[in-house]
Amino acid sequence: MATMVTSTRPPATKKGAGTPPGIPGPNGNGSKRGGSFRDPESHANRYRIGMWVGLASVTMMFTSLSSAYIVRASSANDWIALPMPKVLIVSTILILASSATLELARRKLKASLPRAYTQWVVITVILGVAFLASQLFAWQQLKTWGLYLSSNPHSSFFYLLTGAHAVHLAGGLLGLVLLWLRSRWITTDDAILKKRQASADAVSIYWHFMDALWIYLFLLLFLWR
Amino acid sequence: MSVETHEGVHRHPAPTGFIRKYIFSIDHKVIGIQYIMLALAAVIVGMVMSLLMRLNLSWPGTSWPILETLFPTGAPGGIMNPEFYLSLVTMHGTIMVFFVLTTAPQGGFGNYFLPIQIGAEDMAFPYLNMLSFWVTLVGFLVILLAIFVEGNQGLGEWFAALGPSFRGGSGTVGPIGGWTGYAPLSALGRVAGPGQGAGMNLWVISIAIFCVGSLLGALNFITTLLNMRTKGMSLMRMPLTCWAWFTTAVLALLSFPVLLGGGILLLLDRIAGTSFFIPGGLYVSGLLSGSNPNFPLHTGGSPILWQHLFWFFGHPEVYIAILPGMGATSHILATFARKPVFGYRAMVFAIFAIGLLGFFVWGHHMFISGMSPYSAIAFSILTLSIGVPSAVKTFNWLGTLWGSRIRFTTAMLFALGFVSLFVAGGITGLILGQSSLDLAMHDTYIVTAHFHLVMGVASIFGMFAATYFWFPKMFGRHMNEKIGKLHFWITFVGVYAIFVPMHVMGIQGMPRRYSSFGEYEFLASLHPLVVFVSVAAIITIAVQLLFYFNVFWSIFKGEKAGDNPWEATTLEWNTSSPPPHDNFAGVLPTVYHGPYEFAVPGAPKDFVMQTDIEAEVPDSNGHNGHKH
C-alpha cells in the first residue's frame, strides 16, 4: 500500500502564502501582495545569482589552466623562467585602483547619487582600458626580448594566461560600458532602479573577481616555484 | 505597485512574426524543441556512421558503390579504408556524446519543462537561452564542416590556404582520434596522418564552441531553478526531473570549462607551435620533430596532461547524459505506477552523490596510462562507491513499482527499459572500475558494450520515455501507442542483441576501434557474432524510422490530448496543452503539495496535484495539515 508521500510537513506559511486572486490560501492566509508575478526584488536577484554561478565556471577554467601550468612546470626540463616585465606592477596598481573606484560607484548608486555613480563608472572604465594597455605593453616588452608564444613553456603560459584574463576583463569592460549607458537614462521607477542596482552589483562582483584573478595569475606566473 | 506594472516589466510579450516565434525565439519551449530537433538531426548522422561501421566490420571487403561516389578517396572501389573507418568511429562518438546525449536530455526536455515544473513563466535569462542554442548549433555546423573538409578534396585544398595545419581532403569523414582526441597525435597537425589537419582543427573548435553554449545553458538552468520557483515550490517539492536537470547543470558548469581550457591548449599546440601536450624527440610519419617546417621542434609537453583534462570533463559528461534520464524515469515510473516515488529524499541525495562522486573518478579511464598503482586504487574505490547511490536509485525505482498496478503506456515501457539498461550496463562498471581487471579489458569491446548500454542506450531510452510522456503536453496530441509499443519492443530486444554479444567479444580480447580483424586468428571464431550484432543493429536502426514517423505524423494527425492525459500531479499538467507563451496564462500557480502524491488515502482522486488546495484533502486527524 502506498501510504508514504514525499512531503509530510504542512506547507510553510511563508512559502504558501501567495495564491491566485479569489482563492483562499492555506491556513487561511490570503495573498498580501495581490500580484501573481514575482516582485522586482527577486527579479533583480537573478543577476547576482547568475553572476556567481558564471564565476564558478570561470574559476573552473582558470583552475584547469593553472593545473596544466603546475604539471607542465614540474614535469619537464625545458622550463626557462621568464624575466618579469616591470610594467606588470603598473598593471596591478591600475586594476586594484579600478576595483576601488567601482566600489565607490556602487555605493554612490546605493546612496541614490546617480551623477557621482556615472562619474565613478567612467573612471573605472578608463582604468580598465589602461590596465589592458599596460598588459599589451608587457607583451610588447616580451616581444622585444625575443620571447614569443611558442618560445618556451613559461612564455606560452604567460601569453595564454594573460590573454585569457584580458578577454574576460574585456567582457567586464563591456558590462561597465552598459552600466554607463544605462545610467545616463534618469528614472524614478522602483523596479528599474532595483534592476540597475542589481546589474551594478553583478558587474562589480565580476570586476573584483577579475582583479583577484589577476593577482592570483601574477603570483602564479612569477612567484610559484 | 499594480500587477500590470509587474507584468510590463518582467514578461516578454508573445511574439507574432514567424521568425521571432519559431526561429529566433526567446521562449524556452520553442528553444527546447529546437534543441530536440537538433538532436534528432544529429542522431541520424551518428546512426548512419554506426551503420557504416557495422557494414565494414561484418562484411569486410564488400563494395558499397554509393560510398565510392560520396568519398572517392576514403572508400576507393566502394571499400572503406582503415582511416575512413577510424574517422567514422571519431565522428560517431563526438556527435552522439555532444550533440545528442548532451543536447536532447538537458537542452531539449530540460529547457522545455524545468521552468514549467517549477512554475516559472520562462528561463531567468531568455536571451541567453536563445544564444546558448544558436551557439550549440554553430558548434554542430562546424563539426559537419569537418566531415566535408576531410571528405572533399577541393574543400580540403581551399582550407589549406589558412595554413599548413589546416590542410584537409584526406579522404576520411573527419578527424581521427576518437571522441577523446588523445594527444600527442591530435596535437601535431597534418604531419600525424590523414584527418589530422583541417578536420582535427575544426573538431577542437567545434567542441570549444559547444562548451561555451553548454556553459551559458547551465548558468541559465541554475539561476532559473534558484530564483524563479513559484510560491510554495520549496526545493523538496520539486519533481525529481528538476533535481536531475539542476545537478546536470552543475556538472556541466564545472566540467565544461575544464574541457574548454584543455581545448585551447590543444589548439595552441596545433596552430601556434606551443608544446603543452607534445613531448620532445617525437618521431612521427617518418619525420623527427624539428626536422621539417611542417613539424616544428617540440619539447617537454605531457600527453597525459590532456588525458587528465579531458577525463576530468569526460567523466562528469557521462552523468550529464544519464542524469536527466534518471529524473524522467523516476517521474514517469511514479505516474504510471500510481504511487509516490519511493524514498524521494534518498533519490535527491543519490542524484547529488552521483554528481559529486563523478568529479573524483576520472582516473579510471586512465588505468593504463602508467599512473601510480596507489592513485589507481584510490580511483577504483571512488568509482565503485558510485555503485552505492546508483543502487539506491535502482532499488527505489523497484520500490516505487512494488505492489503497484502499472499502466503500461509506451512512456512507461521505455522508463522500465531505462531501469533495465541502467542495471545491465552499470553492472559491468563494477568490473571495469577495478584497475586490476581493467588492465586486461581496457579498450576491448566490453568497454564499448558497457558505456553504450549505460550512458548511450539508457539515456536514449530515458529520452524516448520523455518524448512519449510529454509529447501530449508539447504538441497537444498523443503519439500513436501501437506504433510506440512496436518501437519499444523491437528497440529493447534489439539493443540487448547488439550489446550483450559485445561483452563476449571483449572478454575474448577483441580490441575496439579496429577496422578489421582478419589478421587475428584468435578472433576468427567470433565473426558470426560480429555478423549477428550487425544484423541486430540494422534492424534496430530501421525501427527508429517508426519513431521518426510517429513523431512527425503525431504532431499533425495524432489523437487530441487533454491538459492532463496521464492524470499526473506536477505543474506542467496544470496548464493547457501546449502551454501558452507565458506557460500559465498570466497567473503563476501556487504549490501546496509534494510532486508525487499518488494514492493518498482519503483524497477524492488517486492523485493530488501540486496545486490542489490543502483543504480539499480530508484530514483524518481533524486538523489542518497533512496526514498520510
Image: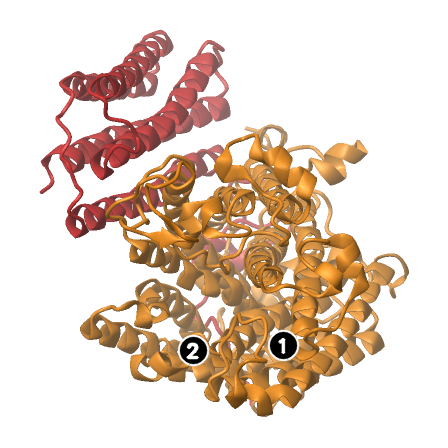
Chain colours: A red, B orange
Estimate the x, y position of residue A51 in percent, counting from the top left.
Answer: 39, 37
Q: Nearer the viewer, residue B295 or B53?
A: B295
Quarter of the image for residue A84 reads top left
Q: Chain of mark 1?
A: B
In the rendered image, the vertical position of residue B573 relative to residue A193, given as above or below: below
Mark 1 element type: helix
Q: Could you say which disc has been placed on residue B415 in the image?
A: 1
Residue visible at 18% across and 45% down? A73
Residue B471 visible in the displayed image: yes
Residue visible at 71% across and 66% down? B79
Estimate the x, y position of residue B560 in percent, counting from the top left.
Answer: 86, 63
Q: Chain of mark 2?
A: B
**Amino acid of disc 1:** Ala
**Amino acid of disc 2:** Ser
Q: Is residue B313 left or right of residue B177?
A: left
Q: Could you say which disc has been placed on residue A94 in the image?
A: none
In the rendered image, the vertical position of residue B134 relative to residue B623, given as above or below: above
- Residue at which label 2 appears: B390
- Callout 1 touching callout 2 (CB < 8 Å): no
Mark 2 element type: helix
Residue visible at 36% across and 43% down? B265
Few, some or many C-alpha atoms within 10 Å of disc 2 (few <14, some 14-19, many ≥20)? some
